[in-house]
Image: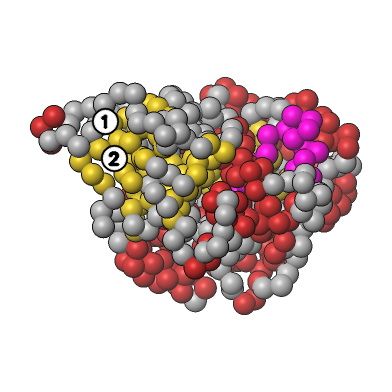
Amino acid sequence: MNPIQTVLPANKRQMMKLWIKHPLATFTANRQDAGNGVVIDQNTGKISELVPSGQSPKKPYDQSYDASGQVLLPGLINTHHHLYQTLTRAYPPALNKKLFPWLQTLYPIWAKLKPDMLFNATQLGLSELLMSGCTTVADHHYLFPESLTEAIDIQVSAADSVGTRVMLTRGSMSLGEKDGGLPPQSTVQNEATILEDSERLIHRYHQSQEGAKVQIALAPCSPFSVSTELMKETAKLARKHNVRLHTHLAETHDEDNFCLERFGLRPLDYLESVDWLANDVWLAHGIHFNEDEIRRMGQAGLGVCHCPTSNMLLASGVCRTKELESTGVHVGLGVDGSASNDGSNMMQEVRQALLINRLRYAADEVTHLDALYWATKGSAKVLGRQDIGELAQGKQADLALFSLDELRFSGSHDPLAALVLCGGHKAAAVMCAGEWLIKNETLLHLDQHAIMKAHQLSAQALVA
Ligand code: ZN
């Protein structure tokens, strides 16, 4: 049955107001809402009204979508990924290894990445995320071998084909094996090339206005793969153009030791020494900080992307989410690269976030609402955005609907808690900027089987 009902004849349909009506439950990001859905203005791509319980929209609407039996969420926001890694999921030589040996096993494979492989990986990873309700993705791409100097341009085009919002980070590695770094020499670039390409990409693609679909951020891979000079110059360049900064930090104890040996500083002290302790910075992982460091991060207004599955798989540790939030650090969620999660599913990540945090905090200290908040408004703050991540009048119309008509939800009583606790993982419908991208659990603009076939061929060619 098609849940769309047209109220006005086509020739009168100029306003294109769509009422998503009668949801089972709604999470606005600020509260669990008992209302009667939202009205979307498809001309502006924004939410024009939150309809109170038992009522109809105040102003006329053209169409309605019957969300009975479905839970309504803001579109989920993934704040850290390496989409190219979808090509090396569950790769036998890398299984069951800690971070550094895991990286050393995979770098020589990743060094062979070609443009068509990156396109296929980006398209498939974004589609996979979209099907889990994720409408905004930050990808950290830092591999620029000679055959792939236009990696970000390729990702912009792949993202456009899927329709999600992206924050594409121009990553970098300048310290190869011969300089004491981890990556093979063929994957690193010199600093002038990195900075020049970063500036080119900002000019070409970065949108700063409300509702931006493509944004660029600058993202040296980690303290163990770039020089001190590049960390400093990248920060200067980002601030000159008002774009954000991102890197991996405090993921493992090995990294603490590396920083102490190389710089005589703990990772956060090193970050401060290169002028990165600021509110335009977000960090992936952020696990191993002491009390004083957490206080300084809060004062600076940093963001942390919490990556529960990746941290469990690589046995990295548990992020101190509540302490970070209590000092003012913004906490969001990320699935991390598909070689250290092996899945790109944001709803599953919400459940993982709840579960891993229950290992550190009491049952009443972290709830399913906290985990949903991190995946929506928390993540939006991490990316420095005020226009997405919540259902409120005037915000971007990014949303996901999940049907509870499945065996796994049968017998549940609180729909929102059921979505997280019973393992919801597949969105029935997803909208980004007022445009439907998924309906009936199906991608509307791409052939799922065709992109999967192309992706599988790329994955085989990469490890051959
Ligand atoms: Zn990562």
Would you say 86 lies left or right of 5 here? Answer: right
Q: How many marks?
A: 2
Question: SS of the residue at dot 1?
Answer: loop
- What type is the residue that disc 2 sits on? Ser
**Which residue appears at 25% of the width and 53% of the height?**
2
| Magenta stretch holds residue 326 | yes
Relative to 247, does residue 69 appear above or below in the rendering? below
Q: Which residue is labeled 1 in the image? A: 61
Question: SS of the residue at dot 2?
Answer: strand
**Which residue appears at 46% of the width and 64% of the height?**
406
- What type is the residue that disc 1 sits on? Tyr
Q: Are marks 1 and 2 in contact (CB under 8 Å)?
A: yes
Q: Label 1, label 2: how many angstroms apart (C-alpha)?
A: 8 Å
| Image spot of residue 371 (x, y percent) | 65, 46
Q: Which residue is labeled 2 in the image? A: 64
Specify the segment rendered in magenta. 319-338
The front one of 442 and 277 is: 442
